[in-house]
Image: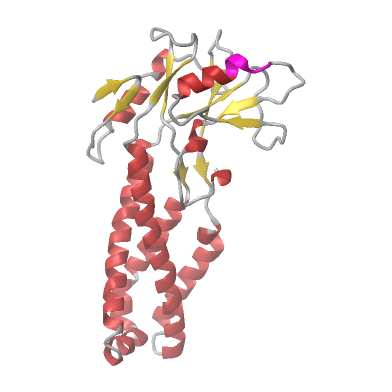
């Protein structure tokens, strides 16, 4: 582990152990004063800090309705295996839906791995620019509730593979009568296997690597995200640290009660190509 201008660069840890970066991050909290509503005491800093969670809610493609349809059609494809046309239609849906979920799992674990090994920074919460001042570790990240839906879909599809191969007449007919289908089924099985492994690894990343997130707001009442008169800011420039950016923003902002509050959410600026940033 090395430090450089307040950034921490970590190395790969075993998935079943507490990662070094996470341990280093959490070690800073015994020295941070926090009120009962998770607001950090930052006086005399010109801003207040609140601990929050940053996440993407479950998307529509993994909503309870779609997942129930998937489970129902999986059962239909097994118990109506002698009705070739019915089993063929239901299996097509099962294969397409689980293929998308498995591909999603591969993408999610790749993005999560990149976030997990990105460096984190420190923001001074008492006096600007002084190393000896209390510092808050900032590690911008978010987690996606789709990870649970992905694991459920891919896991269920993988579990029904064996009985489907043994019992389904539609599967045997498609396998025996058209050699082109054979590599398709083999590819589907391999993709489900890879997707299942990636979904499990992604869950481990979410459980082991998820750390506290914070928002920095102007003094006064903490605003709610539902408010319209609410300014969201971030890094002033890509090459400017969060510490510089936050202190520059709040040192120059007016604290007039007539003006809308200003908040900085570092996690809003995480690169997450699978979801629109506004849905965080």
Q: Residue at x 29, y 70 (%)?
A: 189
Relative horizontal placement of residue 7, taking residue 129 as reference (left or right): left
Indicate the quadrant containing the C terminus: top left, top right, bottom left or bottom right: top right
Indicate the quadrant containing the N terminus: top left, top right, bottom left or bottom right: top left
Q: Residue at x 30, y 87 (%)?
A: 172
Q: Which residues are magenta?
A: 250-254
Relative horizontal placement of residue 127, taking residue 203 as reference (left or right): right
Q: Is residue 203 magenta?
A: no
Residue 230 in the image: x percent, y percent? 68, 31
Residue 185 vertical placement versus 159 (above, below): below
| Badge count | 0
Residue 73 vertical placement versus 6 (above, below): below
Residue in front for this viewpoint, 260 or 174: 260
Residue 266 in the image: x percent, y percent? 50, 31
Residue in front for this viewpoint, 14 or 82: 14
Prevailing secondary structure class for the magenta stretch in the rendered image: helix
* Among the 4 quarters of the image, the one containing residue 27: top left
Residue in front for this viewpoint, 89 or 36: 89
């Amino acid at each position: 582990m090395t430090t450089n201008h307040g950034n921490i660069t970590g190395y790969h840890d075993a998935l079943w152990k507490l990662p070094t970066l996470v341990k280093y991050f959490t070690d800073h909290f015994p020295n941070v004063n926090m009120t009962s509503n998770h607001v950090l005491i930052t006086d005399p800093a010109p801003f207040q800090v609140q601990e929050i969670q940053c996440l993407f809610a479950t998307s529509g493609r993994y909503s309870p309705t779609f997942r129930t349809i998937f489970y129902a059609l999986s059962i239909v494809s097994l118990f109506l295996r002698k009705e070739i046309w019915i089993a063929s239609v239901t299996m097509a849906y099962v294969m397409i839906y689980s293929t998308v979920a498995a591909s999603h799992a591969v993408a999610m674990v790749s993005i999560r791995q990149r976030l997990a090994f990105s460096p984190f920074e420190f923001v001074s919460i008492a006096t600007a620019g002084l190393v000896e001042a209390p510092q808050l570790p900032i590690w911008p990240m978010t987690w996606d509730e789709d990870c649970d839906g992905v694991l459920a879909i891919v896991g269920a599809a993988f579990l029904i593979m064996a009985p489907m191969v043994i019992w389904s007449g539609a599967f045997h007919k498609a396998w025996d009568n058209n050699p082109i289908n054979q590599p398709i089924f083999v590819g589907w099985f391999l993709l489900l296997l890879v997707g299942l492994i990636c979904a499990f690894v992604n869950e481990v990343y979410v459980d082991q690597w998820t750390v506290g997130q914070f928002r920095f707001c102007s003094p006064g009442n903490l605003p709610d995200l539902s408010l319209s008169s609410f300014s969201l800011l971030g890094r002033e420039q890509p090459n400017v640290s969060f510490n510089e950016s936050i202190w520059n923003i709040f040192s120059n902002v007016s604290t007039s009660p007539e003006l809308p509050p200003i908040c900085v959410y570092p996690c809003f600026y995480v690169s997450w190509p699978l979801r629109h940033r506004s849905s965080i």
